[in-house]
Image (cartoon, rainbow, N blue to C red):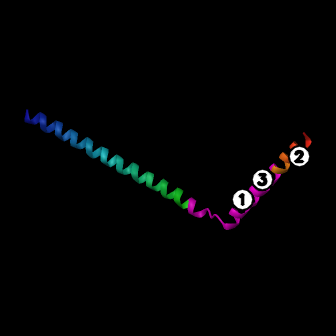
Amino acid sequence: MTTYLTIITTVLVLTQIIRVSQNHFILLKQNKVFNKHIEELVEIEVKKEDYENQRKFYKLAIEKIERELLKETDGN
């Protein structure tokens, strides 16, 4: 009986060691991928000029929509 328990315990311990090592390697791989994505994001430089261009576009779009709405209401 003790031999059986020893074998079962050994098998369980080995499977846990294998699972822990697999998790370790998966986490290492995910960490590499994560760091790669972070490096790509760091390389993208958002400039103040980009924000200014977005503001200009937004203002121009609103002005155009307002002009079109005025044309529609004046035409009716």
Establish if 4 lies above or below 65: above
**For marks 2 and 3 on the same chain, the one whose residue lies earlier in the sequence:** 3
Which region shows up in magenta? Answer: 40-65
**For marks 3 and 1 on the same chain, the one whose residue lies earlier in the sequence:** 1
Amino acid under disc 3: Ile
> Is 13 or 34 nearer to us in this picture?
34
Q: The N terminus lies in which quarter of the figure?
A: top left
Helix, strand or loop at label 1? It is helix
Question: Few, some or many C-alpha atoms within 10 Å of disc 3 (few <14, some 14-19, many ≥20)?
Answer: few
The residue where tag 1 is placed is 54
Relative image position of residue 18 (x, y in whole percent): 29, 44
Q: Residue at x 40, y 48 (%)?
A: 26
Residue 4: quarter of image:
top left
Q: Is residue 56 magenta?
A: yes
The residue where tag 3 is placed is 62
Mark number for residue 4? Answer: none
Of labels 2 and 1, the one closer to you: 2
Amino acid under disc 2: Lys
Q: Residue at x 71, y 59 (%)?
A: 54
The residue where tag 2 is placed is 71
Relative image position of residue 34 (x, y in whole percent): 48, 55
CA gap, disc 2 and disc 1 = 26 Å
Helix, strand or loop at label 3? It is helix
